[in-house]
Amino acid sequence: MRYYSTRNKDKEAVTFTRAALAGLAPDGGLFVPDAIPEYSAAARSSLPVMSFQDIAFETIQPFVRGEIPDAVLGDILQDAFNFNAPLVRVKDRYVLELFHGPTAAFKDFGARFMARAFSYFRRGEDKPLHILAATSGDTGGAVADGFFDVEGIFVTVLYPKGRVSPLQERQIAGLGKNISAFAVEGTFDDCQRLVKTAFADEGLRKRMILSSANSINIARLVPQAVYYAAGAARAMAETGMPVTFCVPSGNFGNLTAGMYALEMGAPIRRFIAATNINRTMPDYLESGVYTPHKSRPTISNAMDVGAPSNFERMNAHWPLKRLLEMLTGAFISDETTRGTIKSVYDRYGYMLDPHTAVGWAAVDALQSEGKNKPNDSAPLGAPIGVLSTAHPAKFAEIVEPLIGAVPVPPALQKVMEREVIAKTIPADVSALLDSL
Ligand SMILES: *Cc1c(COP(=O)(O)O)cnc(C)c1O
């Protein structure tokens, strides 16, 4: 498989390895595969009886064929996906729980695969790879955890001092070994500026081999197609019908991965693209005009994105007409999100985190508008699955006032016992360069 930049009209192609290690294309575009592969007829019909690991292999292998040998890929997947993604029934819907990994959010799937793929790509090199990442909180934890103890790779995470939650700080700065944490005396924007400036510093580039691990990396996107295929196969096994997935979205990497799974031939009918009031994508689907905005803060803050970076990727793959066949948009206010957390708990005893609640509420909204089908040919009662992107205990300060105490899963309990080991630096690039 070859990959090209969304901004390169000549489709000058690179390998998966190069696209992954580069992250962003040199022209500022995002890497996309030149074609989305399809499952073989045999694989497609046996998806409902395949294990998660086997589905992962079938899904990812065509993207990395010729670059990661099958046996190595098998090992990477065993190691990366050592937790599952159960499809649970809540009343007349399914919830695809993606929070059973070490940081209790779906980003574990992408980050853990990417880390192990990077380690393989760097095999035999005597110089280690240094990953520099800025985080406002959540992504840093998934990246730090994903790369923890991975051979040949050092990670430095910059986060705004005093502006992340105690849990997030322990996820970023509680690991040690090959993971370093810098608490920057400034904002997230300062952290991002420091990372960008450090990347451009020639002296540093001579000293170390640098890479980023941000969410637009193709090596984070592709592994996310796996749980869609596995969840859809489960729903198919139980209902005999393709599922409609509702995806709570911000940067739209998660949804793009789902669209890959649909195009590959997983039994998915279509998607609901759910956002909070940062409604750039639902507005685009409604009007056909793409108008990015500044992001506005909400209680589903991992989705506070006014200019979703994966829009560029969707646009490269699919014309608007095709997008409209695959997607229905909906946006949800904080008030409705809170009401949904409360009512779903009161009625069904199921706890939603604020992001998942946006997804649940989007299904409610479309159903009450009569768009639930949600395309007209869908038989009544066709399965609807909401992706649960995080465990509610991660957002206890929002969820607990609404429904009472949320049990903390063991993985998160252990994180809270960690000691924070971070170096405090001023928001100044020379301080960063001196500390690296
Ligand atoms: C990152 C994140 C999202 C948004 O995912 P995108 O791929 O950016 O659309 C949703 N929920 C949670 C909990 C997240 O961490």
Image (cartoon, grey):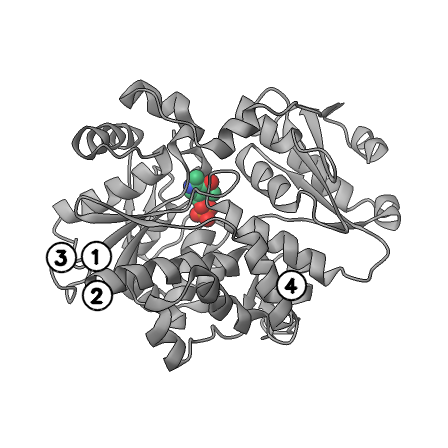
Question: Residue under circle 4?
Answer: 19
Q: Indicate the quadrant where residue 184 lies.
A: top right
> In the image, ligand 1 is in what quadrant?
top left
- Comparing marks 2 and 4, which lies closer to the viewer? 2
**Mark 2 or 4, nearer chain start:** 4
- Residue nearer the viewer, 285 or 215: 215
What x and y, as percent, mark residue 313? 49, 61
Q: Disc 2 versus disc 4: distance between alpha carbons?
A: 36 Å
Question: Residue under circle 2?
Answer: 241
Label 1 Cα crowd, 10 Å radius (few <14 / some 14-19 / many 20+):
many
- Comparing marks 1 and 4, which lies closer to the viewer? 1
Q: Amino acid at mark 4?
A: Ala
Q: Is residue 348 above or below residue 242?
A: above
Q: Disc 3 versus disc 1: distance between alpha carbons?
A: 6 Å
Q: Amino acid at mark 3?
A: Gly
Residue at image coords 40%, 76%:
43
Residue at image coords 54%, 66%:
32
Q: Please say whether residue 7 is visible from this viewpoint.
A: no
- The quadrant of the picture occupied by the C terminus is top right
**Mark 2 or 3, nearer chain start:** 2
Question: Residue under circle 1?
Answer: 383
**Mark 1 or 4, nearer chain start:** 4
Q: Is residue 40 left or right of residue 194?
A: left
Q: Indicate the quadrant where residue 299 lies.
A: top left
Q: Are marks 3 and 1 in contact (CB under 8 Å)?
A: yes
Question: Residue under circle 3?
Answer: 381
Label 3 Cα crowd, 10 Å radius (few <14 / some 14-19 / many 20+):
few
What x and y, as percent, mark residue 383? 21, 57
Q: Are marks 2 and 1 in contact (CB under 8 Å)?
A: yes
Q: Are marks 2 and 4 in contact (CB under 8 Å)?
A: no
Q: Is residue 68 above or below residue 297?
A: below
